[in-house]
Image (cartoon, rainbow, N blue to C red):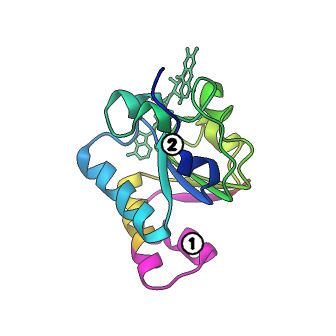
Amino acid sequence: MTEKRIPELDNASIIIACGAGVRTEEDFALVKDLADCLGADIAGTRPAVDRGFISRGQMIGQTGIVVRPDLYIAIGISGSHQHRAGLHESAVIIAVNPDADAPIFTVADYGIIADLREVVPRMIRARLAGAGFHQIIEASIQGVDNAKLVHG
Ligand SMILES: Cc1cc2nc3c(=O)[nH]c(=O)nc-3n(C[C@H](O)[C@H](O)[C@H](O)COP(=O)(O)OP(=O)(O)OC[C@H]3O[C@@H](n4cnc5c(N)ncnc54)[C@H](O)[C@@H]3O)c2cc1C
């Protein structure tokens, strides 16, 4: 618990947070590519720290840090109350998770119910093609079997 907080996260306008659903280096590379094209900072949950994808100073939540970005994109995060304690002041929350019952959807403004490996590449392609916020969300599930978009 001695690791310093990451100052960028205090003032970040966009944060992409990764959770235990981000399982592999390939998954995390997708998260980084999305962060690059959106100009976002990366954070996450305790499992993401445990896997070495992020540092302890990037952990959001009750025992981590509290953030207030304009946009918080939760990828592969269930939404434990310990994690939600650190993000609920975000202006807009998007969650990507194939489990429609995941608690993160109770706080999400936009719920993308689908696998990150389907969704994130589509978001990146849409952004690189110049799409705006709502177009990126719509594009994220286009052509994905059983995917669903819900507005909170
Ligand atoms: C005292 C205490 C303090 C804690 N403090 C914190 C804290 O500050 N911050 C914190 O984060 N945790 C904290 N924790 C841990 C917390 O309880 C949870 O264990 C943690 O937040 C869970 O992280 P997660 O959502 O990434 O993982 P999980 O709960 O395992 O959720 C992973 C999610 O990924 C989804 N998923 C799986 N595959 C994919 C895929 N391909 N695409 C998209 N989604 C997928 C699953 O459906 C699942 O919902 C604390 C715990 C305790 C006991």
Q: Which residue occupies the foreground of this view, 86 or 84?
A: 86
Label 1, on which residue?
138
State the mark number for residue 64. none
Residue 143 magenta-highlighted: yes
Numbered disc in front, either 2 or 1: 2
User: Going by the picture, which residue comes out furthest to the top?
Assistant: 1
Location of residue 120 in the rendering, given as x and y in whole percent from the top left corner: 41, 61
Q: Residue 105 location, x and y as percent?
A: 65, 44
Which structural element holds mark 1? helix
Which residue sits at x=36%, y=57%? 32
> Nearest the camera: 62 or 102?
62
Q: Please name the amino acid that badge 2 sits on.
A: Ile
Q: Which residue is depicted at the point 39% across and 31% down?
A: 49
Left or right of residue 69, residue 136 in this image: left
x then y, percent, for residue 117: 35, 55
Can residue 98 be seen here? The reply is no
Dot 2 or dot 1, earlier in sequence:
2
Q: Which segment is the magenta one?
A: 125-150
Which residue is tagged 2?
6
